[in-house]
Image (cartoon, grey):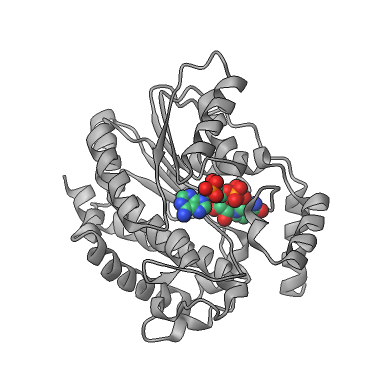
Amino acid sequence: MNGRLELALHFFKGQFRSMPLPTTSYAGRTVIVTGATGGLGLEAARHFTRLGTARLILACRDSERAEAARSDIQKSLPDSSTTIEVWPLDLASFESVRTFCHRAEKELDRLDVLLANAALLAIDKPKMAEGYELQITVNVISNTLLILMLLPLLKRTAATHNVEPVVTLVSSLGHILTTFTQHSSPHIFSTFQPGDHMTERYATSKLLGILIIRELAERLNAAHHPSHPSPVVVNTANPGMCKSDLFRNLPAAGRVVVGALNQLLGRSSDQGARALMAAVAAGRESHGKYVDSARIVEPGSFVRSETGGMVQKKVWGELMEILDGVEPGVSGNVERALAA
Ligand SMILES: NC(=O)c1ccc[n+]([C@@H]2O[C@H](COP(=O)([O-])OP(=O)(O)OC[C@H]3O[C@@H](n4cnc5c(N)ncnc54)[C@H](OP(=O)(O)O)[C@@H]3O)[C@@H](O)[C@H]2O)c1
């Protein structure tokens, strides 16, 4: 069968598949969900609360919306004993990410789950943040900074509590929809300018996320003796196409098309959140893998190609240089997190 047709069939069939109700207990656990003001993040936070999470941090840039999300969860689960806290986190600002992570180091005695869910899709009116196009900064650079800065705490949690902490970075099937022509540039990150290839920028950001998590997983494994696997499981998750506010920044015509498609095929935010919860609960088998609608599957062909493998290393190298400029020595957390 033609590859595109096969992909379209996979997408359509997948959209009608019901996502399992999450049942893993998070009793005694501490969980961070980013972008929990609405959509999938809010529904994932509600599942974590229902499943007995001891301490749940809603990491959000808009404190009013985050407080509304917290009371919405509390109202829907009045008997829950989860302590829900709202902490400010704006992924468009490296300083905000650093402040958030330093606070986590200081105030959290454990971290069992980081659900790196927050992201944005923006084609119109491209913006810059921290010297890069906004989606690259938010979806890629800051998310990686967040993960690397929290690695020592995740590692300590594994060692102290004999558990397997998880980082799930939310991705998208969209990762296969980009030409990613920038991959052959001598410096990939500097090519992501506003106004250039904007229609595929979001998809590119999701592809970069998959490459980064694969490389991180490999490096975590390599830093360890084969008989002692990485204490932290990292994976990526695709929730499928869901009804949420994600498409609010599309141009009007795009909003109409996506809105109509979503009416026909879109999962509810709760169904999308269940797909994310499935990735969080997927365990060691999912380390470095792509969990699509609650199943571990192979990512797109570029990721699996020889070129993709080389680009993955190049992207990692460039990104570590950027991040070490933001938080000196942070790249060393991959090895350090495992050596202690
Ligand atoms: N919906 C889909 O069809 C679909 C498909 C595949 C993947 N995904 C992925 O699923 C995840 C959740 O998206 P969603 O559909 O639930 O969309 P959404 O309703 O737009 O939620 C996105 C969340 O990210 C937050 N966010 C955006 N920019 C941020 C920043 N600079 N700093 C901190 N938080 C920021 C938003 O906060 P504000 O309230 O402040 O805006 C919001 O809480 C995303 O990673 C998205 O790419 C969604």
Q: Which residue is pictured at 26% across the width and 70% down the height?
A: 321
Q: Which residue is pictured at 34% across the width and 33% down the height?
A: 163
Rendered location of residue 149, percent (x, y): 28, 50
Q: Which residue is pictured at 53% across the width and 34% down the height?
A: 45
Residue 248 horizontal side relative to residue 326, left or right: right
Q: Nearer the viewer, residue 144 or 228?
A: 144
Q: Is residue 56 above or below residue 152?
A: above
Rendered location of residue 53, percent (x, y): 45, 25
Q: Is residue 67 above or below residue 318?
A: above
| Quarter of the N terminus within the rendering | bottom right
Residue 288 horizontal side relative to residue 157, left or right: right
Q: Nearer the viewer, residue 43 or 251?
A: 251
Q: Quadrant of residue 213?
A: bottom left
Is residue 168 visible in the rendered structure shown here? yes
Rendered location of residue 83, percent (x, y): 42, 22
Q: Is residue 131 above or below residue 99?
A: below
Q: Which residue is pictured at 66% across the width and 56% down the height?
A: 248
Q: Quadrant of residue 257?
A: bottom right
Rendered location of residue 73, percent (x, y): 57, 26
| Quarter of the C terminus within the rendering | top left
Identify the residue at the far top of this view: 79
Q: Nearer the viewer, residue 219 or 171?
A: 171
Is residue 291 visible in the rendered structure shown here? no
Task: Count every numbered label the image shows and give the total.
Answer: 0
Identify the residue at the far front of this view: 64
Q: Quadrant of residue 316?
A: bottom left
